[in-house]
Image (spheres, grey):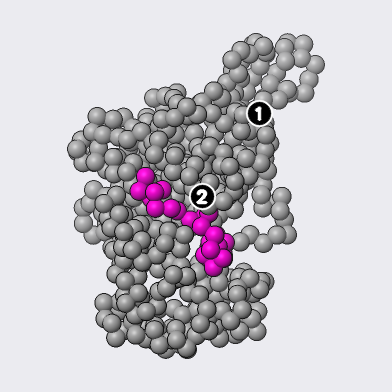
Amino acid sequence: MLFPSLYNLFSDGLLPESFSILASGRTAMDDGAFRKSIEKSLKDYLPADRWDAERIAAFMDMVSYCAVDVSAKESVQCLSDRMKGGNGGPVAVYLSTPPSLFGPTAQALADAGLIDDHTRIAMEKPIGTDLASSKVVNDAIGALFDEENIFRVDHYLGKETVQNLLALRFGNMLFEPLWNANAIEHVQITVAETVGLEGRVSYYDGVGALRDMVQNHMLQILSIIAMEAPARLDSTAVRDEKVKVLRSLRKMDADSVGANSVRGQYAPGAVKGEIVTGYADELGKPSNTETFVALKAHIDNWRWAGVPFYLRTGKRLPSRQSEILIQFKPVPHSIFGKGAKGNGAGSRLEANTLIIRLQPEENIRLSIMAKEPGLDREGVKLQEVDLDVSLVKAFDGQRRRIAYERLLLDLLEGDTTLFVRRDEVEAQWQWIDSVVGGWKDSGQKAQSYAAGNWGPSSAIALIERDGASWHD
């Protein structure tokens, strides 16, 4: 994602003049070998209409490579020498390493004289593995950089549809007056994957779905759905409101975690007609790491009092989709009597539902009740219909940007709005740690589910106990 995004920014003339890219990794290779590997990636991941041999060649001239082991001072000297031969402009450092290496890497760069008051640093999630380790990371980075120069990356925040949540809520009078416990019955957030470990065995085992997906992507989505209107669309105002939501999440413990969470781990099964092995088989040993989690969360504030937020994510599920469902309450009294009908529900009026699909296709769908055509001699008959807005079709002809394009450009321009602030990270971990602690104290184990299903049956019971159903 990184080099295709940088190339697209370069191709569109959005990178600064005299811009250069110095890449580093542990593998020893020269500039030519690294450029060939990047060119192959561009060919694989860029759309055909974005490939231009002349622009590719010009882009490659900006790229150089240096093998680095941050534990060896002489190795880091390679970076220092290359930087001194650069254009002398401001530096942005982008770290895509395990969180345990964020602090040591930044310190090694500082020791080599590569960091000053204007240097910016970006770090890919996760920031730590719990609250304590996240504080260690944040303290180490905070000792070298001011907060406004720290860019904690959650690529979901760069997605068009996630940002459209702000436009939907605060750019339309239609929804905001109803966006509260008076009108909303519950909220669902689903992030489903069809893949398994996909070469991430060493990272994923011991981490699991809760830390890998809920702690960052899903809680960021939840905070945008639930936050109060910021005074301005800037980094301070937006992130102030998000962190208030995260701090309002009701903590779990050994007594409440059983009724409000489900852990699952995929067993052998079939996904999209293809036979797949189970998690333990891929790992090569038994494990209690969850590949699926379903949660019932509560936000203890005035706006959301009594409204459950159901979160669900997992691997080896039937389809790849990320979506948000806002379930509104039914009308307080139906005037349509027995003649009304909705989706075969007899005289039942179906409550309005707003579905915001983030991927694979981006669209917003609102279900409403409408009158069926006819003379109505036996009473007015209603049917549920959808108002469906495909964002791809609505903006046909405009190129859909990779999320990292926006994030990298914001990094270069110094805009932290779409990045995660330290207090957000720590508020997220406080809630996640309460769930993990509840699991540990209660001895809750990961339940088996066949690959290709929507998790353990207890995940269905989690929401159906409240008279609702997951939207599949």
> Callout 2: helix, strand or loop?
helix
Where residue 310 sits, quadrant-wise, is top left
Query: Going 39% across and 84% down the picture, which residue do you hit?
Result: 80
Instruction: Provide the major secondary structure of the magenta segment.
Output: helix
Q: How many C-alpha atoms fall within 10 Å of the one at disc 1: few (<14), some, or many (≥20)?
A: some
> Callout 1: helix, strand or loop?
strand
Taking the magenta stretch, the answer to whether it contains residue 411 is: yes
Q: Position of residue 157 (x, y in %)?
A: 51, 53
In front: 99, or 400? 99
Task: Please name the residue that numbered disc 2 is placed on.
Answer: 236
In this rendering, is residue 227 above or below 403? above
Q: Is residue 126 visible?
A: yes
Where residue 137 sits, quadrant-wise, is bottom left
Magenta range: 402-427
Q: How many C-alpha atoms fall within 10 Å of the one at disc 2: few (<14), some, or many (≥20)?
A: some
In this rendering, is residue 129 above or below 10? above
Query: Going 39% across and 36% down the picture, which residue do you hit?
Result: 249
User: Hey, what amino acid is under mark 1?
Assistant: Ile
Q: Position of residue 138 (x, y in %)?
A: 34, 58
